[in-house]
Amino acid sequence: MIQRILTLFCLGGLLSLSPLSAEANVLEENNCGSCHRLSSEDTDKTFSGPDLYYAGNKFQPEWLREFLKEPTVVRPAGFITDPGFLQGASENLDPHPSFPDEKANVLTKSLLGLKISEQTPVVRNALSKGQRAKIKYQFERTFGCISCHQSLNLAGKVRGGISGPSLVNAGNRLQADWIASWLQKPETYMSKSRMPLYKMESDTQNLFVQFLMTLKKENIK
Ligand code: HEC
Ligand code: HEC
């Protein structure tokens, strides 16, 4: 009996010493936690990089792997921290740490393990030509998404504003379900986003998801 209590006591001690998940521990060991929030509970600090505690909900595995091997710039104007402090344009910052193949795989696996509540899967149908034209118009004109986000025009040229993350390869980078969830409830991921909160029909939202998933790096000319 005493032994059991002791064991429980020790286990409890161990648990309270390591509040991070196994996944987050691998990332901590690699210093990712110095710039990225790896747990939603870690609210008392400002980070110089975007939150990763829901990376497993947000990113596609292949994109993560590639990014960690050969980092690309996602936010051309630089990352802006929560209280609104611009870290400076990415070109003036040190390049993101990069890793050899095997390490990138291990880190990717850990990132994919960082999840918050499960998302409801979105229904995904290919866009008809008419739907595509309509939603593209809404992206550019009705909602003006393009004033803050880079995207691709018909000729495959990159165009658009840079105050939001680039969406030129959203279809390689983001999970469709996550995009839907972001458009529905951005506050799940960020207490105060700088992106306007749009009132839109769920049909329109769904078309935006399909549209963003068609933006791929293979189409950049
Ligand atoms: C010195 C600070 C720093 C360190 C250390 C660091 N990062 Fe980053 N990371 C950043 C910044 C800043 C960005 C945003 C880059 C951009 O948007 O172009 C970023 C972007 C990312 C992204 C893309 C996130 C998104 O929302 O676009 C991933 C994934 C990532 N880092 C993973 C890692 C991992 C894994 C580690 C540890 C092995 C790590 N980072 C270490 C600063 C850092
Ligand atoms: C006024 C600028 C602005 C407009 C307009 C805007 N966004 Fe954003 N968007 C942002 C910013 C900034 C972020 C990053 C979150 C943050 O820092 O608040 C973001 C994030 C996103 C993300 C997540 C990208 C990522 O990698 O984290 C998606 C998807 C997105 N926006 C889609 C859209 C769509 C679709 C529209 C139009 C319906 C739109 N945005 C309009 C500024 C904008």
Image (spheres, rainbow, N blue to C red):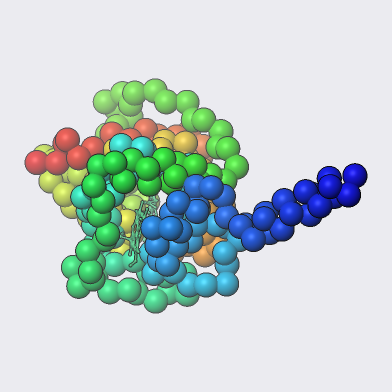
Q: Is residue 114 left or right of residue 173?
A: right
Name the quarter where the C terminus is drawn: top left
Estimate the x, y position of residue 60 in percent, counting from the top left.
36, 38
The residue shown at (25%, 42%) is 101
Q: Is residue 117 above or below residue 160?
A: above
Query: Image quarter for residue 28?
Result: bottom left
Query: Can you see residue 197?
Result: no
- Where, by quadrant of the figure, is residue 120 drawn? top right
Left-right relation of 88 to 209? left
Residue 207 lies, in percent from the top left, at 40, 34
**Residue 95's spot in the image, x, y percent?**
22, 64
Closer to the camera, 109 or 71?
109
Extreme residue in the right direction: 1
Q: Is residue 199 left or right of residue 29?
A: right
* Percent position of residue 114, x then y: 50, 46
Say which of 183 and 95 sits in front: 95
Please tell me in which quarter of the rendered image ligand 2 is found.
bottom left
Residue drawn at point x = 25 percent, y = 54 percent: 98
Residue name at image x 68 percent, y 59 percent? 16
Horizontally, residue 124 falls left or right of residue 114, namely left
Is residue 44 at all visible to an observer of this figure?
yes
Q: Nearer the viewer, residue 197 or 94?
A: 94
